[in-house]
């Protein structure tokens, strides 16, 4: 699980990308992002999350976004990226979903959990 906090933007996205690159060297095919502490996401931040999605899909996995709220949740909703990511209201539900059973990746319904 990767906890993201503050703003995910042009200034901070490269650090997250570097961290994801390090994490993806491990054999895990599921990535959970704890988004509870994220107040703002711009296109640079979305690009990093989408790149993580593409990489996870390539390995038969998925990207889970947990605890989205406020402006970041609205951005995921209006860009319809909820159809790509698996969205969860809490980190606990995201972890439970990953541990429960392997599913077909990318089966998001587009709805941001509230």
Image (cartoon, rainbow, N blue to C red):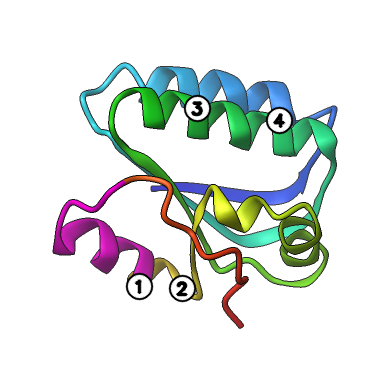
Please give the name of the residue rendered at 37% of the width and 64% of the height, measured from the top-left corner. Answer: 94
Q: Tell me: 76 left or right of 105.
A: right
Q: Earlier in the sequence, mark 3 or mark 2?
A: 3
Q: Position of residue 26 (x, y in %)?
A: 25, 22
| Alpha carbon separation for disc pair 2 and 4 | 23 Å
Check residue 74 for magenta coloring: no
Q: Position of residue 3 (x, y in %)?
A: 51, 50
Q: Earlier in the sequence, mark 3 or mark 4?
A: 4
Residue 57 position (above or below residue 103): above
* Badge 3 vs badge 2, beta-carbon distance below 8 Å: no
- Span highlighted in magenta in the image: 93-104
Q: Main secondary structure of the magenta part?
A: helix
| Alpha carbon separation for disc pair 4 and 1 | 25 Å
Q: Which numbered circle lies on residue 54? A: 3
| Alpha carbon separation for disc pair 2 and 1 | 5 Å
* Badge 3 vs badge 1, beta-carbon distance below 8 Å: no
Please give the name of the residue rendered at 25% of the width and 68% of the height, measured from the top-left corner. Answer: 96
Where is residue 23, by image quadrant? top left
Q: Which numbered circle lies on residue 90? A: 2
Pick out the residue farthest to the bottom. Answer: 114
Residue 104 position (above or below residue 82): above
The residue identified by callout 1 is 93
Determine whether the residue tagged by mark 3 lies in a helix, strand or loop: helix
Residue 50 position (above or below residue 92): above
């Amino acid at each position: 699980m990767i906890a993201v906090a503050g703003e995910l933007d042009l200034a901070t996205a490269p650090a997250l990308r570097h961290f994801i690159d390090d994490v993806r060297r491990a054999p895990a095919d599921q990535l959970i992002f704890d988004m509870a502490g994220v107040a703002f996401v711009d296109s640079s931040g979305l690009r990093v999350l989408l790149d993580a999605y593409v990489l996870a899909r390539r390995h038969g996995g998925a990207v889970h976004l947990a605890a989205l709220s406020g402006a970041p949740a609205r951005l995921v909703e209006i860009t319809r990226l909820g159809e790509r990511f698996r969205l969860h209201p809490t980190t606990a539900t995201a972890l439970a979903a990953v541990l429960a059973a392997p599913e077909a990746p990318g089966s998001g319904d587009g709805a941001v959990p509230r």
